[in-house]
Amino acid sequence: PAWNLDKFIEDYLLPDTRFRRQVRQAVHIISTFLKERCFQDAPHPVRVSKVVKGGSSGKGTTLRGRSDADLVVFLSNLTSFQEQLDHRGTFIREIKRQLEACQEEETFAVQFEVQSLHWERPRALSFVLRSPQLQEGVEFDVLPAFDVLGQWTNAHRPDPRVYIKLIQECRDLDREGEFSTCFTELQRDFLRQRPTKVKSLIRLVKHWYQLCKEKLGKPLPPQYALELLTVYAWERGNKQTDFSTARGFQTVLVLVLNYRELCIYWTNYYDFENPTIKQYLKRQLNKSRPVILDPADPTGNVAGKDRYSWQRLAEEARVWLGYPCFTNRDGSPVVSWNVQVICGFPSAEGLQNHPDQPPHFGGGGAEDGPQSSGEWTRIQVS
């Protein structure tokens, strides 16, 4: 029931201390291997500039029992997005070779189960790390990447030239969204800085998504889109550190129902000040719905292009809205937060008339939204 959702999250979804410690230990083992051992015998000198933990482990939204970690290996040898695309397969095969050598030499008291590489230019190396100190295996995805951000700190936003370079190369290569791994630090910090309860709500939404996945199978929208939708629901509907989990959860499901109108983006790391970025964003935001731009990568519409997958998830959301988790103690229905979506996106002319305030859903409270040619709809379930 609605009043027990917080306890449900605490009892069933939050990782316990032992689990977090195990994942942290596993990440340390692999990170040390990548930085100190992996490329020592490579034919050409390879320097690892940094290893960044991404995925749910890096963002602080891990579900209990789901021990997976993304490690992005930033290599000084990759000097462009083009080079990442062309050469990452070579580095992935070298990492695989070195892992298998460690296994044969028994360098570590661990066992690797490395998956075979089926593609000529694989994007990631997936493997399971097992150790006597770990109660269960930890699944890893290791992804080589171009270090376009350098020694970025969250004290400032990236130089706009980073995004201009990204946009130009994505256009030339026809690979929009392909290089999101280069912005793992931004994706991680975007979610990690959220209040604890928002991350708990994200866990609940991810748990719901996993239940839908078990029931429906593919296709479904990317899970990352649901995580961002949860942040958006909280930013636009509440923005308090303490709130009703049932109302937040219901708001996310109502947004899923309204997927045909979703047009969401944030301006934490990029905005409309630079003309090149502005023109690109205008084109992105004029694409068919749903649009949920990656807050770290404007070339990535994390909502995907398959509206049928959203339709399937929306049908399941409609069923769930009748469940007891959306009923109060007195029998009255939970009421979702008051959140804006748009019906009928303004024309290109409308955007031109308001170049610095295009239709904006995310990155602030409702008062931040534009007062322009869009027709607003407020969604609320009663």
Image (spheres, rainbow, N blue to C red):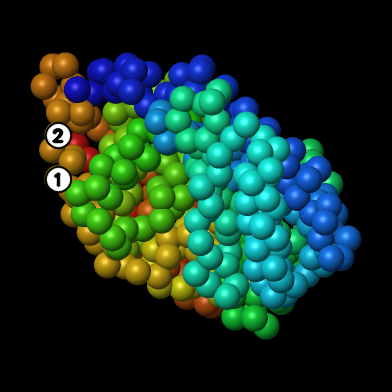
Q: With 125 as the anchor, is 271 left or right in this view?
A: right
Are circles 2 and 1 on residues that touch, CB within 8 Å? yes
Name the quadrant containing residue 81.
bottom right
Relative height, residue 377 to residue 200 (above, below): below
The quadrant of the image that shows the N terminus is top left
Nearer-the-camera pick, 253 or 78: 78
> Mark on residue 319?
1
Q: Gap between marks 2 and 1, in whole Å? A: 7 Å
Nearer-the-camera pick, 105 or 290: 105
Relative height, residue 161 to residue 34 (above, below): below
Q: Tell me residue 77's x, y (percent).
A: 83, 63
Relative height, residue 192 to residue 317 (above, below): above
Q: SS class of the residue under badge 1?
A: helix
- Residue at (35, 33) in percent of width and height: 204
Residue with the mark numbered 2: 323
Q: With 84 as the anchor, is 9 left or right in this view?
A: left
